[in-house]
Amino acid sequence: MDAFDKADWIAIAQVVFIGYFAILTFVYLLLNIMSYVVIRQYMKDYDNNLLPESYGPLLPPVSVIVPAYNESANIIASVKSILQLDYARYEVIVVNDGSKDDTLAKLKHEFALELYTEAYRQQVPSKPVIAVYRSRNYPQLRVIDKANGGKADALNAGINASRYPLFCAVDADSILQRDSLQRIVRPFIDRHDTVAVGGSIRVANGSAIRHGLLTRVGIPKSWLARFQIVEYLRAFLFGRMGWSPINGMLIISGAFGLFQKQAVVACGGYQAATVGEDMELVLRLHAHFKQRNKPYHIAFIPDPVCWTEAPEDMGTLRNQRIRWQRGLLESLFKNKRIITSRQGRVAGWVAYPFMLLFEGMGPLIEVLAYSLSLYFFMTDAVDIYFTLAFVVVAFGFGILMSTFSLILEELTFRTYTSKRALLVLIFTAVLENFGYRQINSWWRVRGLWQWLRGRKHNWGAMKRVGSINSP
Amino acid sequence: MIAQEHNLASDTASEALLYWLNLITVGVLLAVVATFVSLFWLRLKHQKVAEQVAQRQTYWQQVLFEACDPKHRIKLDSQRLRELKANKNIFFWFMQKWSQMHQYVRGDADDGLQQLADRLKLETRILRLTDTQDTRLLIACCIALGDMQKLSSHAVIRLVELTDHKSGMVVLTALRALMRYDAPLALPLLLKNVQHIAPERLVSILRECPPKLLSEQVSQTILRDNPKYASYLLKVIKGMDLNVSDTFVMQTLQRFADSDDIIAATIGLIQSPKLLPLVRQHTKHPAEAVRIQATSTLARLAQPADIELLWQLVCDKSWWVRYRAAEGLFEQPQLARSEIMARAAQLTDEYGKTMIAQIAAETHYGRI
C-alpha cells in the first residue's frame, strides 16, 4: 500500500511539475515570438524616429523626478547626466527624502542651491516639505527637501511640485542616455491614449562614465554583475517587450518610466505603504482605466535608455531580490480586482494570472521541484535517467531563454560591440543557470515568506560600489 | 494482483514520459546550439549590413553637403538613386536628413537643397508617403514639406487635410509647414483649433508668421469670437510680445466688460503710457486677477506719481497683488533700496512689510 501511495505521489508530482513547466515554456515562447516580431518592426525605422531639434518645442514638456535617500555616492553623477539630456523643455526635481547622509549637502554645494519660495500644490498625499531649493547655475533644477516617507512618498512630493503634464520617475542611481527623453516620449506622440511608458534598463557596471554620461559600454569583472546583465536583457527585451503590444505590461521599472501626470493623480499617486510602488502604480492604472472603461495604453520601448548600478555583493543582491518579490506579490494582491473585472482583458485575464503563477509562485515551485527531484533521486523513487533528463531540460530551457534575449539584443542595439563581450555574455548565459538562478529562486521564496508574514518595508538601502560616479 | 497491474501501468507511463522527456531534452539542446550559432551569424551579418548602411549614409550626407552649393552640379550615383526610389526606409532616412540640413543653412544653401529636392521629386514621394496611418512618418513628412521653398497645390491641400488629423503632433507640424509657406492661409486654420493647442506650442508655430499679420488677425478674431477663446488668444499675444493698438485694448475692454479673465489679460497687454489712467482705475477692480495684472502693468509703466499707488497696493488683501506691487517698487529707477526699506519699516500693515522683506531677499537672489 505504501509503495502504491508513493508511486502515486511521484506521478502526481511529475505531472504537476511537467505541466507547469510546459505551460511556462509555451508562454515564454509566445512572448519571445511576440517580442521578436515587435522588435523587428520597431527597428525598421529606428534611425528615423527622432524629430529635428527645431521641432523640440512641439514635444510635450517633461518633469523629471529623482527621489533620493542616502544617495550621496551617486547623486551628483546622476543629476548631471539628467541635466545634459537632449530635450527641448524639461525640469529636474530632486526629492531628498530625509536622507541621513550628506546627499542634500552635496547637492547644495555642487549645484549652488538657494532657498526658493514657491507655491506647492498638494495633488497627491505626501509627507511635509521642509524646503524647496533652486539651483543658481541650472534654472531647470529644483530640490525638494522633505520629511522621510519612503520612495513612493518622495515621488508623490515630486509630482506635487512638478509643472509639466508628463513626469518621468528616475532612480537616483541611474545614468540616462542623452536622447532618453526623446525616445521615451515617442509612444505619447504615436498614440494619444498612452498613459505610461517604460524604458529598458541596462547594467552600468563595467562601463565608462564621464561627466555623468555613459561613454563606453563594457563588461564588468564581477560575475554577479555579469549575471545581472543577462537577467536584465531577458527581463526587458522579451519579458516586457512581449506584453507591451497587447497592453499587458504590468511593470514599469522605477528606475526609468514616463507617466501622464493627470492619470497618475486621478489614481491617487504612488502608494506610500508598498514595497514595489512602481508595479503597484502600473497595476492601479490598469484597474483605474478598466473600471471606467476608458481607452488607455501602457507602452514599452526597448531602447537602452537608462543605465543602473547593479549590486556586486551577495548581501545587497539578496535584499534587492527579496524586496522585489515582496513588492510583486504585494502589488498583485492589492490590485486583485483587475482579474475579476469585466474589462480585464489581456492585463487582467492573461498577464495578471501569468505574473501570479509564474513570477509570484514560480520560485516556490522551482525550489520545490529541485528539492523533490533530489529527494526522489536519493530515495531511488525515480531512476537517474529521468532525473538527469529533467535537469537537462530545465537548465537547457533556462539557457535557451537567456541566449534568446542575447539574440534579441543582437537584432536591436548590439550594445556590447566586441566579439569578446559577446563570448563572455554567452558563457554568462550558460553559467547563470548553475547556481545563480537557484540562489535567486531561494531569495524570492524568502521574499514570498516575508510578504506572507507582512514584514514592514523600508527604502531598501543598497551598498554602492560607486561605479557610476566617476569624474 | 491489482497492485502489480497498477505498478505495470505506472512503469509504462513513466517510460513513455521518459521517452518524451528525452526527446524534449534533445530538442532543447539542439535549440541551444542553434541559438549560439545564430548569435554569431547575426553578429557577422550585422557587421556587414552596418558597413553598407554607413557607406550609404556617408554618400547621401556628402550629396546633401554638396547640394548646399547651388552652383555645384551633383552627379548622382544611379545605384544609390534606385535604392532611394525602391526602399521606403532609405527614403525616410534621407527625407529627415534633408529636413535637418535646413536647420543649419540659410540663403543660397536653401536654394541648393530645393534644387536637389526637385531633382529627386521629393515632394511627390513625400505626398505618397502621407497616405499612411503611421503618426511619426506623417510628422516627418509634414516637417519636410514645411522645409520646401515651393509647394504644389496638392501638397497644400494635403497639409490642410492633415490639420484635422487625430494626432496633435501631426496637426501642429502640418500647421507649422503651412505657416511657413502661406501664413494668411494657415493662420485662420490655426486660430480655428487654437483652444486645443498648448500656449508654448502655439507660440513656436506662430513665430513662423509675420508679426503684423498675426497681430491683426488675432485682434480681429478676438473681437469676433467668444470670451473663453479670446482670453487664451490674449495670453498668446502676451507670450509672443506682440504689439497691440490702444484702440484694440479699448474695444476689447468694452466688448468683454463682463469677463474678468479677459479684462485681466487685456490690461496685461497695455504698453502705452497713454492708457495709464485706465490701468490705475483697474488696480481697484474687485477681481483679484484684474488687480494683479493692473499692478504689474502699473509697475512697468509707472510715473513718479504712481509710486504712492504702488505703496497702497503693497497692502492689498491679495498676496499676489502685494507681491507684484513690491516687485514693482524695487524695479523703479528713482527709488533706492534703502529708501524702500526705510519706508517699509514705517508700514503699519504687517503683510505689506513682510512682502517688502521677501522681495528684498529675492532681489538679492544669486548675489554673493
Image: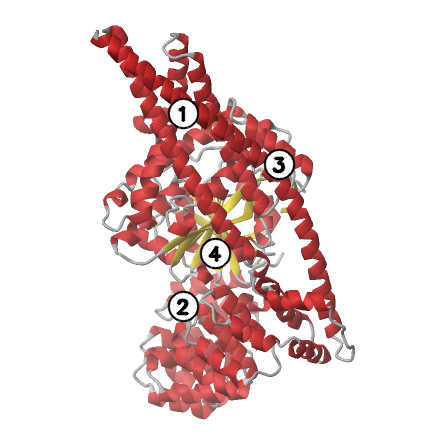
Number of callouts: 4
Residue located at (45% from left, 26% from top): B23
Q: Residue A283 in the image: x percent, y percent? A: 34, 45
Label 1: which secondary element: helix
User: Gap between marks 4 and 1, in whole Å?
Assistant: 55 Å
Horizontal side of residue B171 vs A110, given as left or right: left
Q: Which residue is mark 1?
A: B20
**Location of residue A458 (image quadrant):** top left
Q: Is residue A1 above or below residue B41?
A: above
Q: Which residue is mark 3?
A: A467
Horizontal side of residue B128 vs A372, given as left or right: right
Q: Which residue is mark 4?
A: A63
Disc 3 marks a residue whose amino acid type is Ser
Instruction: Residue lying at the far left in this picture: please name it.
Output: B2
Horizontal side of residue B63 vs A326, given as left or right: right
Instruction: Residue lying at the far right in this picture: please name it.
Output: B72
Residue located at (44% from left, 59% from top): A188
